[in-house]
Image (cartoon, rainbow, N blue to C red):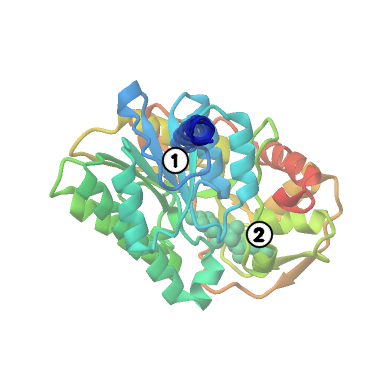
Amino acid sequence: MLLKDQSSSAGMDYIEMKRRGNFTRRILFVCVVFALLIFIFKRPSSISGSTKFSMHEVGVTHVLVTGGAGYIGSHAVLRLLRDSYRVTIVDNLSRGNMGAVRVLQGLYPEPGRLQFIHADLGDAAAVEKIFAENAFDAVMHFAAVAYVGESTSEPLRYYHNITSNTLLVVKAMAARGVKTLIYSSTCATYGEPDTMPITETTPQVPINPYGKAKKMAEDIIIDFSKTTDMAVMILRYFNVIGSDPEGRLGEAPRPELREQGRISGACFDAARGIIPGLKVRGTDYKTRDGTCVRDYIDVTDLIDAHVKALAHSRPGKVGIYNVGTGKGSSVKEFVEACKKATGASIKVDYLSRRPGDYAEVYSDPSKILRELNWSAKYTDLEQSLSVAWGWQKAHHNGYDD
Ligand SMILES: O=c1ccn([C@@H]2O[C@H](COP(=O)(O)OP(=O)(O)O[C@H]3OC[C@@H](O)[C@H](O)[C@H]3O)[C@@H](O)[C@H]2O)c(=O)[nH]1
């Protein structure tokens, strides 16, 4: 009985040991699976805000593109990826579109090519974290509010957004030893000069909060650069139009900002019938037909200037360049070109002047040709608008289509 009991107890021990062994193996298996999952999900992903993403390891330039989900920024990202750069986009999506980021991710899905970080550059801790966790070689700083009309009704927003965010970006660059900055500035920093065309030495006397804030941001960058060996390129854009010739990206302003928006967006909205007609703001300027004259530069050319600026940037040097065609077109001429490009009969209402507007600006682009070997290639307004219309037609609801 006792023996029987003992043998039965030994049998029980053996079964118990086997059960425990199986249990341990299961635990080990689960641990290994967990470790594998952690390894997979911690690798650089295309949507991640916390992955260390060093470009230097692979000898490829890693560019931080602020505002990379926006109209101009997304076109810059596309070009940089095409040219084999690695890119991190930081965007708060207040004006930019996640749809543009998704297009770019779809085109360049390989791990480590494109990283998107949803963050606001006004958040100092977030900016510091982004720079601490990534090794950037260069920054292209596009992110900013950028409507002249809106800047006159919301000046504090413009001063804050444009100056403070630039300050935080530059501070973070300095703290982490990021040596190259390409800054998006604007012809609006010149205001309304007495002589045309505008050269880089034309006095900057901005007349609206947008232009004034951009001039302040330029000053912040230039003054800081004198204390370091940072390479700085300041590009003063004239009026940007057009879109990716392959139709992958376009200009998709927020519908709620229609009233404040740029002439190109308003023309396309009128051509699609989204708004009843185009409002031409001011017909009594001292220009050839009474409407404002602007220098319209195609976004493909503009981004080419950025890539050339990056290639020509030198430590301790500040380069300042106008980016324009050198040719001025009036609002009326723009509307005619838009009618031809869209084939739509756009109804035009003539209204009083928009606050903050200046009569006539166009660039002298000879410095950028001389020093960076850049000149605009897409100088036919109607052609640039036709390309942009191609994307607009296919995206009635912007990137939501
Ligand atoms: O609906 C509209 C929009 C604009 N316009 C006029 O079209 C002209 C161009 O205006 P836009 O708003 O397109 O462009 P702006 O010249 O004011 O500034 C633009 O160019 C310089 C960039 O740095 C700015 O970010 C950009 O907004 C102005 O005369 C404006 O009054 C209209 O007549 N109707």
Quadrant of res 127:
bottom left
Q: Secondary structure at mark 1?
A: strand
Q: Determine the residue located farthest toward the front in the rendered image.
A: 1
**Looking at the picture, does residue 87 appear above or below residue 173?**
above
* In front of the other: 181 or 351: 181
Tell me where residue 115 appears, x and y as whole percent.
Answer: 48, 39
Q: Amino acid at mark 2?
A: Asp
Q: Which residue is mark 2?
A: 289
Q: Amino acid at mark 1?
A: Thr
N-term-proximal mark, 2 vs 1: 1
Label at residue 88? 1
Callouts 2 and 1 close, C-beta under 8 Å: no
Q: Is residue 9 left or right of residue 234?
A: right
* In front of the other: 2 or 89: 2
Q: Is residue 299 left or right of residue 208?
A: right
Residue occupying the point 31% across, 35% down: 137
Residue occupying the point 43% across, 28% down: 85
Tell me where residue 221 appears, x and y as whole percent.
Answer: 26, 53
Q: Secondary structure at mark 2?
A: loop
Label 1, residues with CA under 10 Å away: few <14, some 14-19, many ≥20 = many
Q: Is residue 245 left or right of residue 346?
A: left
**Looking at the picture, does residue 118 appear above or below residue 38?**
below
In three-dimensional space, the C-alpha distance between marks 2 and 1, rounded to whole angstroms, equals 45 Å
Q: Is residue 380 left or right of residue 42?
A: right
